Image: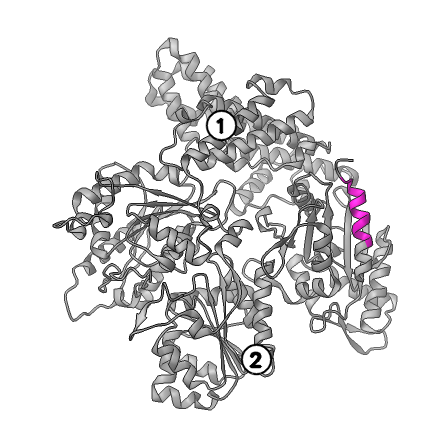
Amino acid sequence: MTTQPEQVLENNLLSQLDSLGHQPILIKTEKDFLENLKTQLEKHNKTTFSKEEFNKILIHLSKGNIFDKAKTLRDKFVLHRDNGKKSYIEFINQDFWCQNEFQVTHQITVNGKRENRYDVTLLINGLPLVQIELKRRGVELTKAFNQIQRYHQDTYGYSHALFHYVQVFVISNGVNTKYYANNPKSSFKQTFYWSQESNKNITQLTDFANVFLEPCHIAKMITKYIVLHESDKLLMILRPYQFYAVEAIIKRVKDTNKNGYIWHTTGSGKTLTSFKASQILTQNPKIKKVVFVVDRQDLDDQTVKEFRSFDKDSIDGTENTKMLVNQFLDDSRPLMITTIQKLNTAISKSRFKSQIEKLKDEKIVFIFDECHRSQFGDTHRRITKFFTHHQLFGFTGTPIFVKNAHQENSLKYTTKMLFDECLHQYVITDAIRDENVLKFSIEYYNVFKQKEEIEDLDVEGIDKKEVYESEEYIETVTNYILANHNRKTHHKTFTAMFCVSNVEVLVKYFDLFKKKRDAGEHNLRIATIFSYAPNEEDKNADGLIVDEDFRIAAEPQTAYKIPHRDKLDQYIEDYNQLFNTRHSRKDGNAFLNYKKDISKRVRNRQIDILLVVNMFLTGFDSKTLNTLYVDKNLKYHGLIQAFSRTNRILNEKKAQGNILAFRNLKKATDEAIGLFSDKNAKETILVAPYEEYVLQFNEAYQKLIDITPSVDSVNELRNEEEELLFAKAFRELMRVKNILSTFTDFNFEDIYMEEQEFADYSSKYLDLYDKIKTDTQKENISILDEIDFELELIHRDEVNVTYILKLLAELKNAPVKDQQKKEKEIIDMVAGETELRSKKELIQKFILNNLPALENDDDVEEEFNRFWKIETKKAMSELTLKESLDHKKVEEIINDYLFTGRMATEDEVIDALEKQPSVLQRESISTRITNKIQDFISTFISGV
């Protein structure tokens, strides 16, 4: 047998879980489930419940959504007993997590919208807290993930909705096994492998179960390492390297008084790790305070916001040193966040120092964020000298070694010197392997005609600064960015940053971008932020990015004239006009609000290019940012930090972080990669050269035509097995094409496949996807559903209704002999584009019936809008008439969906019917109408 059947996989797992200590139990019906829950809760609480008492517990357990139930699980319930007394009922023991009741069952059947049977369920104290979905070997894990997503819709919320208590999902095909927290809104990107402490992934189901599903460990993960994200009302679970880091810190505090640091690469979730470590440490009665220290005010605010999102009552920031001192003296605040500057003031100035003197001998744990930056020198020594019973822990993505250390008073301070040994490391190569961050694609654009860059030339008389700040150089770079920005950002699907050497250069670039925008040469939204303190290029090239101080930029009075202050005012005013805001730099808070607004608009893709010197090159995370233009020298940790702004995971289309360098940073990049991973890591961290992806594409194309030699041959595929082979082959082709298309050199002439041919195959690929959707609605089982079609790879943002209108205008003016060909090209383009596909028939109808009657191309848009309104009204009338729906209520459902993104519930859809159906008909009628409303929105509203 070539593949292990799913049933064999399930039987083996059940046997293994039994041997690990999960007591097997057979549960066939809901009645069995509730009887077992009653028995287990009685056993756990060492009591018995009457029928009425258990019913009270059941009502309590049934309330709320997944997030509410996660809180209920962790709280005790005050049960009013039949005899009038009160009992506190515990649902899970969080302090002694091994002291719970562990069971395993399988094939629980639940009836909801459809009947579902769950593969393997782990019960703790009778509640279903872990759900395991299995697939036979060879089936993609996305199949198991998607099945759980369907369970959310079909059955998890039915009856008493006790399956909303699931905390952890596990998906496996035997060979690959991943876990994730119960969050219906999560994507497959939020699923993780468990690993050893050395970061070696544990993928086989048997090995994973031995470690992760062992009763004490899974109970510990649920009670200690799931985080309830308050802001988004969802559950998060720590990844293995985060778990090991927190465990290492806790062990260090428990067993020693030594310091330590965590080396986890940028983008790996250090805030969550540090929060969980801080939270657990506050529960240690020997620790007086846990102080989380950052080195900038805006990071203080950002960290407070993030910590509160994990636990809204966990923390308050410190707006000033007086507040910091008050929090030190407040015994009700075990966890504090402050800046290193305020902490330094508190222990330096006599009026503050005298107040917190009484805490100097208490056990204080300091956790330093980004400990590669400002925690060096006098301030660090002052803190350690003042607090006699301190323990320090640092978090960094780029530690300071001797090679990249900044010299201070003839000393080079390294991270190890100040924080002792590294307790756990998870470097960039680990994160890329685990798909927690992306690789970098680096392209170097040589502005100069010489073979080598200016930095490599030792030519007497060349003023490098003069060359780099010349109008010709800046014009060349600006034009190159404008010519390639759409390609790099997938037609502004993503955003970019542009970092330059100093404020003087920044001003020249910004003014030129604005001049070209005013002249109609581009429509990019450019924003900037900087301070005007002296910030010359790093002469030592030691890689240290000294973040510009917003307080300096906001300072209204200065001892000397700074010409760029007026420029900053002008640029902020430009920003205000662009976004209808009222920002200024009148004081530190006003300027900080401007900076926060920029952060938000970069993340929301409202700013196309953010022009900076140093700000935002460290500590700023945006998943929607994928490109960094570089016109400054970077080295070591400064280089890695800056590049890492681009490599946050988002979706399939964001395949890598793009770096477009106008300086020769190749040697510096190689040295940085060698320092922070190893000298052989370049292939892991950097995407391959353009030529290699051309070869990969051509190989993928050859495999595609081996299966389907022509576009028409897709129609001749004999069965779903052959269709699956085609879908996988074309998906691989799309993945490589997605990377290729971001290279500035990319041209279809370099590859075997023609552009029209790619569009034609795309259309056939989408036909298969439509077939799956139809089969799913009819409840047919299709093996095509075993793969993720990754439609975002086929969506082209430049091809929208506006673009099609432009082509229709060109079609109107085209010679008669070319019209049929151009018409086919337009229809083929629409058919091969995900957002426009549903509009194909209507666009074809417009071309046939309306376009010939127009006198000139200027009337195309106006006539199309008129045509679209008529067709929309007609389709709405047809929908409401055919389904006997109240027209106004359907409009309310659509408007609510467009505003909130939430489709109407079954009750809301049924309420829109003019005549109420029978109970047996409700589900099928609601599903049919919901699908029709979604199709209407997709066709007539989305993208128009």
Secondary structure at numbered mark 2: loop
**Magenta region, mostly helix, strand or loop?**
helix
Q: Which mark is residue 256?
A: 2
Reply above or below: 223 against 195.
Answer: below
Amino acid at circle 2: Thr
Foreground: 376 or 332? 376
Q: Position of residue 378 (x, y in %)?
A: 34, 78
Contact, mark 1 vs mark 2 (Cβ under 8 Å): no
Secondary structure at numbered mark 1: helix
Position of residue 818 in the picture relative to residue 879 (left or right):
left
Q: Is residue 9 shown in magenta?
A: yes
Q: Position of residue 884 (x, y in %)?
A: 66, 32
Reply above or below: 745 against 607.
Answer: above
**Residue at the spot x=33%, y=61% of the render?**
545
Give how far apart the Cα atoms at labels 1 and 2 are.
58 Å
Report the magenta residues as a range. 4-15
Reply above or below: 510 against 270.
Answer: above
Q: Residue furthest top?
A: 817
Q: Is residue 56 shown in magenta?
A: no
**Residue at the spot x=47%, y=81% of the render?**
327
Residue 137: name its quadrant: top right
Query: What residue would you read off at disc 1?
Result: 698
How crowded is the residue under tag 1: few (<14 C-alpha within 10 Å), some, or many (20+)? Answer: some
* Quadrant housing the N terminus: top right
Position of residue 354 in the picture relative to residue 2 (left or right):
left
Q: Position of residue 267 (x, y in %)?
A: 48, 56
Foreground: 762 or 444? 444
